[in-house]
Amino acid sequence: PLVPHQDPTLLFTNAGMVPFKNVFTGVEKRDYARAASSQKCVRAGGKHNDLENVGYTARHHTFFEMLGNFSFGDYFKEKAIFYAWELITKEYGLSKDRLMVTVYHEHQEAKDLWRKISGLSEDRIISIATSDNFWSMGDTGPCGPCSEIFYDHGDHIFGGPPGTPDEDGDRFVEIWNLVFMQYESLASGERINLPKPSIDTGMGLERISAVLQGVHNNYDTDLFRALVHACEEVLSCKAVEENQASFRVIADHLRSCSFLIADGVTPSNEGRGYVLRRIMRRAMRHAHKLGARDPMMWRLVPALTDQMGAAYSELVRSQSLIQETFRLEEERFQKTLGRGLKLLDEEVSKMTGANLSGEVAFRLYDTYGFPLDLTQDILRSKDLSVDEQGFNHCMEEQKAKARAAWSGSGDKGEESLWFSQHEQNGATEFLGYTTLEAEAVIQSLIVDGKEVDQVQSGNKGSEQEVYILVNQTPFYGESGGQAGDRGVLTSESGRLLIKDTVKKAGALIAHCGVLEEGN
C-alpha cells in the first residue's frame, strides 16, 4: 500500500524497496533470496518530493509505478549490472549508443564492472560526486552507492549528460537505478554495514514506457493519453502547447489522489491528509485555469478505473468513495478559489518586486484554503515567488494566538500540555480504517500531567498510568460517543497494556495504559 503501516519513518511508500526494508536490515527473514516487483509509489512530501516539477517536465510524477529486482544477500554488483545490461540491450532492444551510466565517484569497482560487462567507453561511464549516486530511502535506513542508467532521447531535445550544467533538461533521462545496498544509516548519523550486502533496483514504468513507445515525454505514452483525452472530453477543450502543463497536472494528480484515497487517506489539514489536499487543490486550480467552474475531477475517475482497474482492483472497489471524496473537496474549494485568485491578481498588480509578501500568501492560505505551494505554482508562470520567511512568521503568529486562546479554556495546565504536544509533534495519523496493527515511533510519554523520558515497570507500582503519543496508530480515540480502542503496545524493551484511547487537542490520539513489563 501507499501508506507504509509497518514503516513509521515514511509519509508514503516512495520506492520499490520499502516493503523489503526489514529484510535488507536483517530484522525480517523470508523464504526467498531474490524478488521482483511493481510497486505503487508517491513522491509528494518528505525527502523525495516531485510535486513542484509535475506538469513542467517530461518525466516527473507524484504517483508512479516502480519496477524492481532485488537480491537479499544473494547476487551482488557484478550480476546486478549484467542482468540490467542484458535486459535493456537484448530483451528491450535498446541501442548501446543511446545509453550511458553514472557511478559514485569513490566506487571504482562499479566503474570497472560496467566497462567489462557493457563495453561502454570511458566517456560514457561518468563519475558523480554528489548524493545523486549515493541512494538512501530517508534520513535513516538502508543505503549505498548506486549506478544510474541514462537514455539519450536525441539532440533535438534540450539537455546535457549527467554531471553537466544542462543535466536537468529532458534529453538524457535516468531509466534505471541500481543500488548496491551495503550500509544502514542510523539516527545517530552513524553508518554501519548491513549483515548481507544486497541489491535494490528501481525502474520507473512511465519512463521506460516512453522509451519503448518511441516518445520522449511520459505524458505521450498510452498510460496518460487516455486520461488527457478524458479530461479534454469533460472540459470541452483540447490540450495544446499553451495549456499542456495543466492537462498533465490533472492527469498525474488524478492518479495519485485516487490511489491515496483507495488506500485510506482522506483530505485534512495535517499529515498525509494535508499532502492529499495539496495535490487535489493543485489539480483543481489547473482545472479552473482550463475553464472549469463546477467540480470535474470526480468525473474523470471512471477513465482512470478503465485504464488501471484491471491491475489495481482497489480502484474498482473504491471508485464511489474516490468520486465522492473528490466531489466534496472540489465543492468546498470552489467556494473560495475564485475569490482567492481575484485577491492574488490584485496583489500581483500592485507588486514592484518579484516576491509576493508572506502576509498575502498567508491570507490566501488561512482564508481561502490556498496551500503555500499552490500559490507558488500560480506565481511560477509569472516568474514570481513568495516571501517564505514572511509566510512562516505569519504562521507562527497564528500559532501563538491559538496557544493563548487554548490555554484560556478548560483545565489550563492540562490543555496547555496537550496543545504543546500537538504543536511539537503534529497530528496523529489514524490507520484504523485499513489495519488493526502497525509500527510507530513513540513521540512522547506523559505521566501525572508531565512529559517524561522513560517509564519503568515498578515505578510507583505496576498500575502507574501513562499516556503515550505515537506518530501513527490503528487505535481509535474516544470521540462522538464511540469508546476508545484497547489493546497492546510492545517494543524491544517493554509491553504496555492500553486500557483506553482518547482524543486530545483535537488531533492527537493518546494511548492510556499501564506498563506490564520492561521500560
Image (cartoon, grey):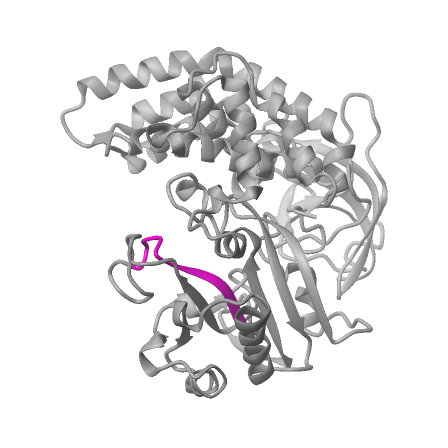
Residue toward you, 264 or 223:
223
> Compared with residue 226, is residue 111 higher up or lower down, i.e. above or below?
below
Residue toward you, 269 or 398:
269
Residue 337 is inside the magenta segment? no
Question: Would residue 344 appear left or right of 192 to someone viewing this image?
Answer: left
- Percent x, y of residue 475: 78, 40
The secondary structure that most of the magenta stretch takes on is: strand
Res. 50 in view: yes
> Compared with residue 472, is residue 182 higher up or lower down, i.e. above or below?
below
Question: Would residue 208 appear left or right of 512 to someone viewing this image?
Answer: left
Residue toward you, 469 or 221:
221
Residue sitting at 49 percent across and 28 percent down?
283
Res. 181 in view: no
Residue sitting at 73 percent across and 45 percent down?
311
- Percent x, y of residue 321: 72, 26
Residue sitting at 42 percent across and 38 percent down?
55
Task: State which quadrant residue 494 falls in.
Answer: bottom right
Residue sitting at 50 percent across and 54 percent down?
207
Q: Which residues are magenta?
A: 167-179
- Percent x, y of residue 190: 51, 74
> Compared with residue 173, is residue 271 higher up or lower down, i.e. above or below?
above
- Percent x, y of residue 419: 57, 33
